[in-house]
Image: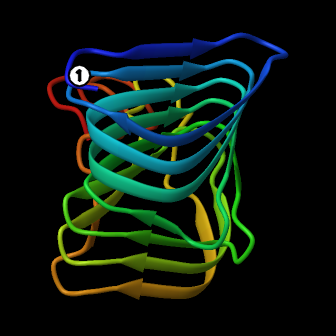
Amino acid sequence: TNGVLTITTLKNSRTNISNITLGSSSRLNNYGNLSITNLTVESSTINNYGNLNWTNPNFKSASITNNGLISVPGLLALNNVTFYQNGTLSIPGNSITINYSSTLEIQNSGLNLTTLIIESGGVLNHKANSASYLYSANVTAINLTIKSGGIINTSGKGYTAGNGPGGGSTAAF
């Protein structure tokens, strides 16, 4: 689409879509069961609260928030994506690659993977804490590769000033 497209699926609905491009500033809000084949995302937002399954994705720039279940066939390769993980991932090989210009932010208890690769320019972090310890980058991986320029960065994600064990009074950690 050349304009702004908003797609919202309803709770308990089942929808199959083939060959769709979410153009600049488009938004997909999934509350039901949605399967997409040949998905292209250009500077768009995907919010998943239901069950989302995609094959053959092409992310040119995307923000994805998963509060439901996302299923992918094979490894999850994040390319030009900010992925907020607060739901369940179903990945047959339990493998994630965070490529250049991509961030995976863990917002729940963590990930159990076979393989995690963080390429140059890829970032793994977690949601920022405040007065309470709620979030951490808890990842279990049999194979972990962090390539030159790839990072796990939790700077500024700890307790806010004056909070936490031995909390100070002027800076966030």
- Depth check: 163 or 136 in front? 136
- Depth check: 2 or 153 in front? 2
Q: Which residue is mark 1?
A: 25
The residue depicted at 23 percent of the width and 22 percent of the height is 25
- Depth check: 73 or 170 in front? 73
The image shows residue 54, relative to residue 78, as above or below, that is above
Looking at the rendering, which quadrant does residue 112 occupy?
Answer: bottom right
Does residue 120 appear to the left or right of 115 in the view shown?
left
The residue depicted at 21 percent of the width and 67 percent of the height is 100
The image shows residue 127, relative to residue 161, as above or below, that is below
The residue depicted at 37 percent of the width and 32 percent of the height is 159
Residue 21, percent from left and from top = 36, 38
Residue 166 makes an appearance in the image: no
Does residue 103 appear to the left or right of 143 in the view shown?
left
User: Quadrant location of the C terminus?
Assistant: top left
Residue 170, percent from left and from top = 14, 25
* Colour basis: rainbow
The image shows residue 44, relative to residue 79, as above or below, that is above
Q: For mark 1, give the secondary structure.
A: loop
Does residue 58 appear to the left or right of 141 in the view shown?
left
**In the image, what residue type sits under mark 1?**
Ser
Residue 123, percent from left and from top = 29, 61
